[in-house]
Image (cartoon, helix red, strand yellow):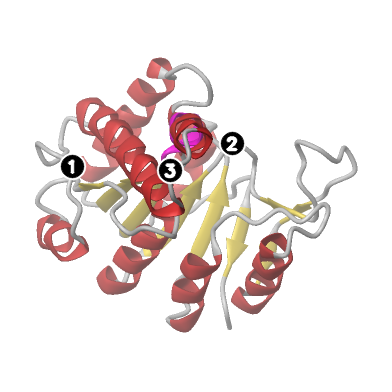
Amino acid sequence: MLRRVVFSVGGSVIAPHDLDVDWLRGFGRVVDRFFEHGVEIALVAGGGHTARRYIDAVAELGGSKTLQDQAGILATALNSWLLVSAVKHAYYEPISDIWRALSYLGKYVPVLRGSVPGVTSDFSAALLAEAAGAVFVNITDVDGVYTKDPRVYPDAELIAQMTHDELMRLVDLADRRVPGAHAPVDRAAAAILARSRVKTYVVGKDLRNLRRLLEGKSFVGTVIKTP
């Protein structure tokens, strides 16, 4: 069983288009169950479709990239309140500082919101996992890391295992908008995970599969580690 976990909960899972309240309720039960069995857990909320809608609207109105970042950050705050509501053992409000979140780890389930302009909430999750000596679990809308974006390319193949160096190369391709490139985290987050060799998992939203991962059993997804 995993003992200390930071979940980066993608906004694409929390609010793909409409809010997925049923999934949030089920996810909250999974988190509470493992917390009650001694697993130290922190959650970080992504912005997803809500963030993209506001970012696009700010851009159309002529707002700067900085203003667009702030709109996206506030979308993660909205989603973080949903996670606080879904998890019985969550700290009573979202947190924006990783050190404060770290101080609550094990006593509560701290829920972190985005706070850093220019990067995704995965960056905050990676920093927290590094500081806590935790594994990093990215929950996204696909089953793991693929050779190409599986939502676009039917021949995309799931990568069961890869190294942090391989992840960095994939992220660089995505940053250059190379056709077919599909990275699970932004470059800043990938760099944090790589520098401290944080064991990383990328999985989809299937809760039964997620339970298997937490129990240390075989699961569908991608493991990223450096020997």
Residue occupying the point 48% across, 69% down: 188
Q: CA distance from mark 2 to mark 3?
A: 29 Å
On the image, numbered disc 2 is attached to which residue? 141
Q: Amino acid at mark 3?
A: Gly
Q: CA distance from mark 1 to mark 2?
A: 23 Å
Whether residue 116 sits left or right of residue 189 in the image: it is left
Give the camera-side residue of 12 and 35: 12
Could you say where residue 147 lies in the image, as x and y percent from the top left?
A: 80, 56
Q: CA distance from mark 3 to mark 1?
A: 27 Å
Q: Residues within 10 Å of mark 2 (few under 14, many from 20)?
A: some
Could you say where residue 82 lies in the image, as x and y percent from the top left?
A: 28, 28
Cβ atoms under marks 1 and 2 closer than 8 Å: no
Give the camera-side residue of 3 and 97: 97
SS type, badge 3: loop
Q: Is residue 45 visible?
A: no
Q: Earlier in the sequence, mark 1 or mark 2?
A: 1
Q: Which residues are magenta?
A: 45-52
Residue occupying the point 80% across, 60% down: 178
Circle nearer the viewer, 1 or 2: 1
Give the camera-side residue of 151 and 75: 75
Q: Amino acid at mark 1?
A: Pro
Residue occupying the point 28% across, 46% down: 113
Residue 130, compared with residue 16, is above or below; it is below
Q: Amino acid at mark 2?
A: Asp
On the image, numbered disc 1 is attached to which residue? 94
Circle nearer the viewer, 2 or 3: 3
On the image, numbered disc 3 is attached to which residue? 63
Residue 134, compared with residue 12, is above or below; it is below
Give the overall secondary structure of the magenta segment: helix
